[in-house]
Amino acid sequence: MMKNKVKIYAAALAELIMETKPASQKKIADNFFKLIVKNNYAAKAGEIVALAEDIILKKKGNKKIILQTARKIDGKRVIKSFIKEGDVVESEINPEIIAGIKVIINNEKQLDFSLKNKLDKIF
């Protein structure tokens, strides 16, 4: 039941953000946070916001792209020909991949060009 409430809160937050002018979005977010605190869902705030972000991106036809590398890189520069305006690009350092890059799209699809992945396939 709790997972369904998280989805409901996320859908409501996404709808509010999309319908509100940017100047009013902070006030909406503050009031929304007060609501989830009042209803004892503050611990789930991160999950609600992440899910709301996913909903907004999908409705706008955009993607969330996570680039994992062993060392710091400029993620947007690396994949600039594959992204469009409105896409969210995040870079994460993951020393376990040793070298190469792992691309995660919308937390679903993965392209794994890491040395770790190649070694795992060999052994």
Image (cartoon, rainbow, N blue to C red):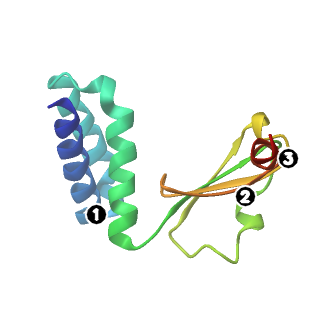
In the rendered image, residue 80, in percent from the top left (x then y), is placed at 70, 72
Secondary structure beneath label 2: helix
Q: Earlier in the sequence, mark 1 or mark 3?
A: 1
Q: CA distance from mark 2 to mark 1?
A: 27 Å
- Rendered residue at 19%/21% (across/down): 40
Q: Are marks 2 and 1 in contact (CB under 8 Å)?
A: no
Q: Between tags 2 and 1, which lies in front?
A: 2
Q: Amino acid type of disc 3? A: Ala
Q: CA distance from mark 2 to mark 3?
A: 15 Å
Above/below status of 85 relative to 70: below
Q: Between tags 2 and 3, which lies in front?
A: 3
Residue at the disc numbered 2? 75
- Rendered residue at 23%/65% (across/down): 19
Q: CA distance from mark 1 to mark 3?
A: 39 Å
Q: Quadrant of residue 82?
A: bottom right
Q: Quadrant of residue 81?
A: bottom right
Q: Which mark is residue 18?
A: 1
Q: Is residue 119 left or right of residue 59?
A: right
In the rendered image, residue 68, in percent from the top left (x then y), is placed at 70, 47
Q: Are marks 1 and 3 in contact (CB under 8 Å)?
A: no
Q: Earlier in the sequence, mark 2 or mark 3?
A: 2
- Rendered residue at 23%/44% (across/down): 7
Q: Is residue 29 left or right of residue 75?
A: left
Badge 2: few (under 14), some or many (20 or more) residues near its Cα, within 10 Å? some
Residue at the disc numbered 3? 99
Secondary structure beneath label 3: loop
